[in-house]
Amino acid sequence: MGEYPHNVKVGLLIVAAVACVSCGRPFDVNVGTDEPIQVDVSMEVHVYQHGDQNAAVVKAKQEDFQTVMERRRNRMEEVQKLKNNRLVGEDSQALLSVRSLPAGEYGMYVKKTVDEENQDRNFLMKAEAAEKGIALGEVKKIHWQHWQRKSFPGEWIQLEGAEAGTYRWVKKTGASEDSGDDNKAEKSAEPHGNKGAAEKAGGQKRRQKKGKAQGE
């Protein structure tokens, strides 16, 4: 094969030199964008905040529960005094009910105390129903029976009436929490229709005794 002309050899040497220089340098690749890169963190923020909210709700509920329990402990003596004075009683909804409202400022105090106690009781019963997954009515019934047992002799309590869905107020008599005699009670001083029947029965017994004595 013949030799290349002089000018061709020079050209080949220049190409080879350029190729060697190119091999020694990396290629510059433009990976930039016309617009700044934006990272969408909305999902992460949402998840983070959602977890925070759940934790905050749980903490708030715990604090509310503790606050309510503390309020009831502080109010316990006041409520018991109202029961001792026969001003309030335990009704069928597991709440306090005013039986005799005094006049003036003291009457306002009685009503305020009863309203605050009932508000806290309702809060706790609703929380219990939600925690146990049962109806609020079931929780109220459980607490109603609880307050019947806890009441002292002479205090007003509400019992089931003769007909379904009716209730009557009575004064509890000599029943301890474990005696099983929770339904023993004095008749209310208010007329309920049973008072006349009791007096009639008593009169009949007296007449029977009188007639027996005369026969002897």
Image (cartoon, grey):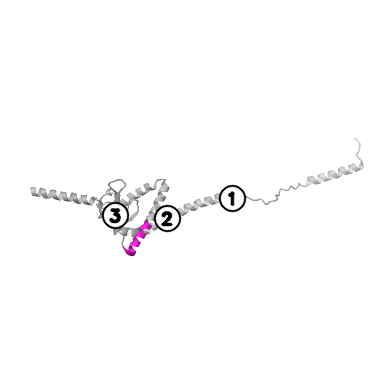
Q: How many marks?
A: 3
Q: Position of residue 200 (x, y in %)?
A: 19, 50
- Badge 3 element: strand
Please tell me whether mark 2 or mark 3 is closer to you in this view.
Answer: 3
203 with respect to 153 (left or right): left
158 with respect to 131 (left or right): left
Please tell me whether mark 1 or mark 2 is closer to you in this view.
Answer: 1
Q: CA distance from mark 2 to mark 3?
A: 29 Å
- Badge 1 element: helix
Question: Front-most of 191 and 36?
Answer: 191
Q: Position of residue 36 (x, y in %)?
A: 67, 52
Residue sitting at x 16%, y 51% = 203
Would you say residue 69 sits in the magenta stretch?
Answer: no
- Under mark 1, the amino acid is Ser
Question: Front-most of 123 and 2?
Answer: 123
Residue 42 shows which numbered tag? 1
- Badge 2 element: helix
Q: CA distance from mark 1 to mark 3?
A: 60 Å
- Under mark 3, the amino acid is Trp
The disc, 2 or 3, on the residue closer to the chain's N-terminal end is: 2
The disc, 1 or 3, on the residue closer to the chain's N-terminal end is: 1
Per the image, the residue denoted by label 3 is 156
Query: Secondary structure of the magenta portion, mostly?
Result: helix
Per the image, the residue denoted by label 2 is 66
**Mark 1, other Cα within 10 Å: few <14 / some 14–19 / many ≥20:** few
Q: State the extent of the magenta-drawn residues as a range.
A: 103-117
Q: Position of residue 97 (x, y in %)?
A: 33, 55
Would you say residue 112 sits in the magenta stretch?
Answer: yes
- Under mark 2, the amino acid is Gln
Residue 15 in view? yes
